[in-house]
Image: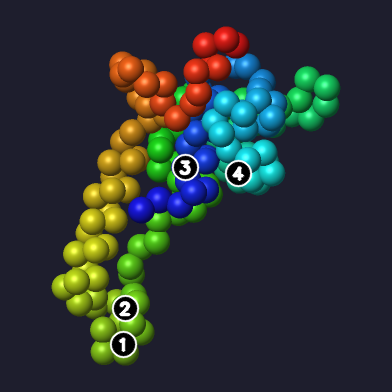
């Protein structure tokens, strides 16, 4: 349902959230989250553009969260790289439908609305705070930082 870009962006954001205030290299994030480094660099640019991640250049360069993990929703991350597409006009371009969606497309659009609401109410902090036996979207190497 969600694109690979969304998955990778969430992994990177969670990884940074698990290391608050630390500047992590793209290479470290890529290794830890199992995201190809070239692809990750593009994801980081997208997240930086919208103010989720702050990047710094130089010898001690890398990325960190630009704001608190409490203030970043899952939907914020998704919208930065691959927003969910709403159905606001007939996908079949039927002129007699236009913005008056048929019942099928109306229901699908309603479902997207519900998913967006749930994701907007879910913060990155919630993803890393929930107690489970698995570390969310990141490898075991995070414990060694």
Badge 3, how many Cα within 10 Å: few under 14, some, many 20+? some
**Label 3 belongs to which residue?**
7
What residue do we see at 31% from left, 78% from top? Answer: 90
Mark identifier at residue 64: none
Q: Are marks 2 and 3 in contact (CB under 8 Å)?
A: no
The answer for how far apart the CA atoms under marks 4 and 1 are is 36 Å
Question: Of discs 4 and 2, which sits in the foreground?
Answer: 4
Mark identifier at residue 94: 1
Give SS at disc 4.
Answer: helix
The answer for how far apart the CA atoms under marks 1 and 3 are is 34 Å
The answer for how far apart the CA atoms under marks 2 and 1 are is 6 Å
Among all residues in the image, which is located at the extreme bottom? Answer: 95
Position of 143 relative to 88 (above/below): above
Question: Of discs 1 and 3, which sits in the foreground?
Answer: 3
Mark identifier at residue 90: 2
Give SS at disc 2.
Answer: loop
Earlier in the chain: of badge 4 and badge 2, it is 4
């Amino acid at each position: 349902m969600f694109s690979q870009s969304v998955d990778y962006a969430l992994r990177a954001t969670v990884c940074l959230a698990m290391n608050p205030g630390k500047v992590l290299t793209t290479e470290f994030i890529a290794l830890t989250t199992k995201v190809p480094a070239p692809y990750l660099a593009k994801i980081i640019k997208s997240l930086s553009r919208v103010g989720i991640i702050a990047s710094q250049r130089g010898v001690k360069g890398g990325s960190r969260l630009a704001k608190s993990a409490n203030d970043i929703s899952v939907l914020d991350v998704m919208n930065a790289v691959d927003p969910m597409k709403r159905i606001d006009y007939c996908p079949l371009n039927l002129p007699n439908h236009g913005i008056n969606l048929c019942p099928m497309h109306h229901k699908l659009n309603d479902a997207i609305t519900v998913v967006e609401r749930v994701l907007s109410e879910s913060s990155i902090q919630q993803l890393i705070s929930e107690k489970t036996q698995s570390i969310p979207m990141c490898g075991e190497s995070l414990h060694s930082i």
